[in-house]
Amino acid sequence: MISQVWNPDVRPLVEEAWRCYATGATRAAISTTWTAITADIISKIAQLADDGDPRARGVWQKVENAQAKGLAGGVRDMQQIESSLLQTAEDFELIDAIDRRELERVKEDRNLCVHPSLRRPGVPHQPLPEVARGHLAVALSVLLTHPPTQGKKAAKEFEAYVADADFTPTESYLQATFFDRLRSATRRSVVMIAAKHALELGSDGSAEDSLPERMADSLHAFALRDRALVEHAMTTLADRFSRVDPRRQLRVVGRLGTHDYFWRAVDRPLAERIDSLLVQAVAGLTRDSPVPLDTARQLSVVRSPIARSRLPEVTQRFADLPAQQRAMIADRSPDPYFVADVVEFVGHAWTFRLGELAGHTLVRHGPHLSQEDLESALVAWAENRQCLHAFGMPGLAVDLLGATGHLGAGRAAAFRDLLDRAAAHDRDQGTSVAASYQDLRDRLDQLPATGGRLGGGRIGPGPTTDPDH
């Protein structure tokens, strides 16, 4: 924790306090800990003043005036400043009321250590080593390791960052900037803000609003640090979420429905309602019709084990959908759970357009394929004329080679089998489809004997799942 002290000028004081404790100089350890506390608070007030906080400028002016007087009159002025320093720190939200109470104990014990006259003669204050260690731990955890970030200001900065047009959901940055270095109370506020927006409790209900999606990404980043804190926020908001309109609830399910912290905040009646709403969405699909993107995203939560356990009816309805519609849903959210559905669709696509959709979805699932899955998919590809002859399939075959790099050089045999089957098809049918796969053959020839990856690189959201495409 000493290495994480925010101010490098204060860090030597903290190291000195630790050395005093380690060598048995308990009084000196407590006194130096208090010195580090005062130095840290004053330096943070100075930074807030530099950042333009008018109240901080007023306090910092008093410090500068005391420094200008030197030892003659400055000591008395600094004593007056330090007498209310913890209250000042609380006013500036550098600490909260509970933190101040803990640090007041450090101050009181420091006064006992440096003013022996406070006790009767012959009864010197003898602080225990555990007390010195505890004071240092408290100072580090509630103050010294945190930057001068004010709670309300940090929350506003978080909201502004997420709403910014240049927002990127970089987990490490979100964690470092808006979680790791914040005090616990501020963390709770930031997580609550993210949860409210992710649940659409702070929006106007517009489906086009990107803020809930961004907040959901932020919430996931925070959950990787403290899942219990995120779950607590979701549970706190669960009652309000249960009363929002069905369209919002379905959008939230599509956004958060694969996360355990969402479902642990959903009670049984609400889970049954969500299950019923999704069943209605499935019932609204006509056979062989395109699946709307929003509906596909919502139904794709069946890839999560916890979602399947809470949504038994819609899980069964998904399994009963035609292969084409299951593949459209799978294309929205690639996952190992959907691999069998995708392979089945490759073998059953009955138009060239559906053949390309099957190929694209298979590429999207490439990183999730086992060697056996790949072999089955490519056999189905070769035996389905709608896949083998579709215009975009030769290029997708190259993409699939790149997407299955995790299988290593062993996957080459499956692709060469596809080429052999295409050549056999040409001989039987008098066609020349094998020639269109020449790029795949060239890539296979370039594949290292022990290599893994070779670029295809067009993996990404595909337009073929759009019903308007």
Image (cartoon, helix red, strand yellow):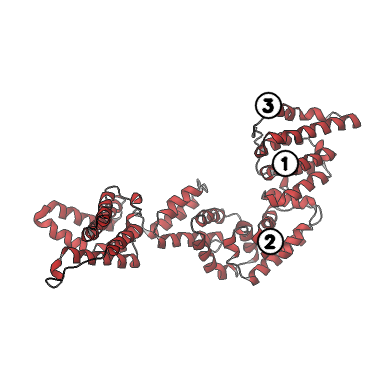
**Is residue 87 visible in this depiction of the protein?**
no
Q: Relative to residue 444, is residue 229 drawn left or right?
A: left
Q: Which residue is mark 1?
A: 371
Q: x, y percentage for residue 169?
A: 52, 48
Residue 316 against residue 123 in the figure, above or below: above
Residue furthest out toward the left: 72
Residue 58 against residue 423 in the figure, above or below: below
Disc 2 + disc 3, Cβ < 8 Å: no
**Residue lying at 66% horizontally and 59% vertically, measured from the top left:** 305
**Residue lying at 66% horizontally and 50% vertically, measured from the top left:** 333
Marker disc for residue 446: 3
What is the spatial separation of the Cα atoms under label 1 and label 2, in whole angstroms? 27 Å
Q: x, y percentage for residue 22?
A: 27, 55
**Label 1 crowd bin: few (<14), some (14–19), many (20+), radius 10 Å:** some
Which mark is nearer the camera, 1 or 3?
1
Q: Relative to residue 447, is residue 104 drawn left or right?
A: left
